[in-house]
Amino acid sequence: MTSPIEVAERRWRWAGGALHVVHWGEEDAVFHEPSASTHLLDADTSLVVSCLRAASNPTDTAQLWRLAFGDEPEAGDCQTLSESLEGLARIGLVTSEAS
Amino acid sequence: MNVGSLSAADLTRRLHGDGLRLRNGPAVMCVRSLLDEVRDGIALHYAGHEVPADDSFTNFHISVNRPPGLRRWLRPQVQFSVDGELPFTPLPGNQGFPLFEWGMNWCLSMHLHRFLMVHAAVVERGGHALILPAPPGSGKSTLCAGLVWRGWRLLSDELTLIDPASGRITPVPRPVSLKNASIEVIRRFAPQATFGPVVPETVKGSIGHFSPPPGTVERAQDTAVPAWVVLPRFVAGAPTQLKPLSKGRALMALVDNSFNYQIHGAGGFHTMAALVERSECFEFSYSRLEEAVELFAEIADRREEERADAPRGSSA
């Protein structure tokens, strides 16, 4: 499990490449060209991905929360977001690095 | 000319000689076999299929025969070859016709890449296609068999061919393969179905094929518009239940069951997405075939009524 300190210290970056997106209500189907992979994302995760794609620099978890949801992360929010981002990293849509 | 118009002697001569040209949907096979059960299976199940001219383009040259050597006589086997290659290990000697069918499925699913191909049964009514993607053992072929004997047209019990350019489904009407208890279920459900011999103890259990219902092969050029994506599941004793399925999950099911999605890249994604966008999507569980078939008749009738009620110029 990732500790809160680790969450704070990681920064996230879009993996790069074209992403094709089809919106269906609360879920988005996406096709990532470089990995030729298809995924189903819920609306929140898709929003986070779009923020990372728009960001020009690696973004830490708390800042990413602010960009995506427009408010300050509360207790546990960064942990939850970090777990989602780890899932995105596993499927090759994002990368992470130490701050 | 079709297979049924050939005399038994002519069919045998072609299979033993330069090969029988046989149209299977968009592909032409050249089939050679010395085996009586393959000849008899073709005569029974492919009577309505076109026999193209000998000089027509042939996609696959296939043969089903005994391997050379002692295994011709000692515990005989059968082997399948395509264009001189042997993609499978030989099977016991009584499995010539199932091997012929499996081999043709393999040829089509491994090579017809101008289509986006999904491992799914597909049937049509009123020009609308019902796509049933599912892994083996889900009751897909049994449901498909029930539907094609109650007013739906068989496009394929195994292979859904999606044309990326038009989004339409191209038929590949062939004998329908059933396993184990499903054979008897369909014999009772559709006594008019023409079954060939049941082959026991294959890797899939007992296998039986019935011929495409009348009128199916004759309409092999009539494509259909996708209208429903349904994930079927046979559950012994379960009530008939149809539940809405999100479009995203329907798309993922089609992707998971596709033979060649990865080859089509982003184009394949958009083809699948467009198919799902225009389709109603459901999960379906059943145990009673008669009820299942009635439910799909209602769904198709509703679609027809909606189309009839739609303002002129709009498409349902």
Image (cartoon, rainbow, N blue to C red):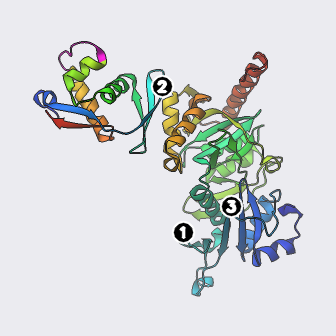
Residue B162 shows up from this direction: yes
Residues marked 2 and 3 touching at CB (< 8 Å): no
Residues marked 1 and 2 touching at CB (< 8 Å): no
Q: Give the labeled residue for mark 2.
A: A23
Judge whether residue A75 is colored magenta.
yes
Vertically, is B170 above or below B251? Answer: below
Q: Give the labeled residue for mark 1.
A: B88
Helix, strand, or loop for circle 1? loop
Numbered tag placed on residue B198 in the rendering: 3
Vertically, is B84 above or below A61? Answer: below
Helix, strand, or loop for circle 3? loop
Residue farthest along the top direction in this orientation: A71
x then y, percent, for residue A80:
24, 25
A50 horizontally vs B109: left or right: left
When asked about the image quadrant of residue B203, the answer is: bottom right
Counting other residues with Cα less than 10 Å from the Cα at mark 2, is it few (<14), some (14-19), or many (20 or more)? Answer: some
x then y, percent, for residue A71:
25, 12
Q: Nearer the viewer, residue B288 or B216?
A: B216
Helix, strand, or loop for circle 2? strand
What chain does mark 1 sit on?
B
Residue at the image point whose x is 53% and y is 50% from the top = B260
Judge whether residue A68 is colored magenta.
no
